[in-house]
C-alpha cells in the first residue's frame, strides 16, 4: 500500500467516524467540567472582562482567546471548529509519524484507523462533550 492510499483511507475513516458520531451522539449537556471553564473564559473575553477561572484552566488561554476572537457570536461552534481541526491534525500527524519511523503504510494506516475509531478518540469524543 502506498502512503497516498493510506492517507486517503485514514481521511475517509476520519470523515465517516465524525459524521457517524455527530449523527448518533445527541448533545444534551455542552457545559460540563473543564469544558465549562474554557467556555466561561471565552465568554469573559468576548464581554471584555478579566478572565477568571480555576487553576490550571486560567493558565490555558490560547484556545479560549482564539475562539473569542474568531467566533464571538457562537462560542460553542468555535470550540467545535477548532477541536475538529485538532482531531484531524492529530490523526494525520500520527500517520506521518508512524511512517517516518519506518512503519509500513498499511500498518500505519491500520494503527491510525484504530486510533480514530477508539471510543474516546478526539474524533468521536468532540461531539459528546
Image (cartoon, helix red, strand yellow):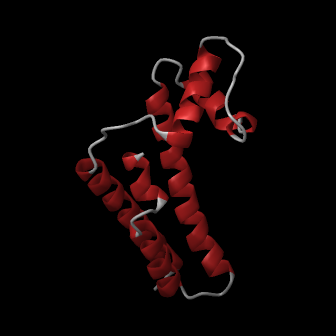
Residue 103 vertical position relative to residue 33 in the rendered view, above or below: below
Task: State left or right for residue 16 relative to residue 66.
Answer: left
Asked which quadrant contains residue 53, the reply is: top right
Q: Residue at x 39, y 57 (%)?
A: 124
User: Could you say which quadrant of the image residue 63 lies in?
Assistant: top right
Q: Quadrant of the N terminus?
A: bottom left
Residue plotted at (36% across, 66% down): 13
Coordinates of residue 77 in the picture (x, y in percent): 44, 32
Note whether 91 is above or below 56 in the view shown.
Answer: below
Residue extending farthest to the left is 24
Q: Is residue 8 visible?
A: no
In the figure, residue 119 lies in which quadrant?
Answer: bottom left
Label count reads 0
> Residue 11: x, y in percent?
42, 63
| Residue pictured at 47% horizontal, 78% vertical | 109
Vertical position of residue 17 compared to residue 1: above or below = above
Relative depth, front residue between 6 and 40: 40
What is the residue that sits farthest to the right in this orientation?
59
Q: Does residue 16 appear in this view?
A: yes
Q: Residue 128: where, in percent of width, then height?
A: 37, 48
Compare residues 128 and 122 and report the one nearer the observer. Answer: 128
Amino acid at each position: 500500500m502506498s502512503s497516498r492510499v493510506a492517507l486517503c483511507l485514514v481521511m475517509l475513516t476520519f470523515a465517516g467516524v465524525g459524521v457517524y458520531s455527530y449523527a448518533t451522539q445527541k448533545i444534551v449537556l455542552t457545559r460540563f467540567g473543564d469544558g465549562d471553564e474554557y467556555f466561561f473564559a471565552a465568554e469573559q473575553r468576548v464581554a471584555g472582562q478579566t478572565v477568571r477561572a480555576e487553576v490550571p484552566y486560567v493558565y490555558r488561554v490560547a484556545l479560549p482567546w482564539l475562539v473569542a476572537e474568531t467566533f464571538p457570536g457562537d462560542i460553542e461552534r468555535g470550540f467545535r471548529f477548532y477541536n475538529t481541526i485538532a482531531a484531524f491534525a492529530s490523526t494525520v500527524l500520527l500517520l506521518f509519524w508512524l511512517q517516518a519511523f519506518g512503519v509500513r503504510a498499511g500498518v500505519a494506516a491500520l494503527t491510525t484507523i484504530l486510533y480514530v475509531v477508539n471510543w474516546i478518540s478526539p474524533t468521536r469524543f468532540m461531539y459528546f462533550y
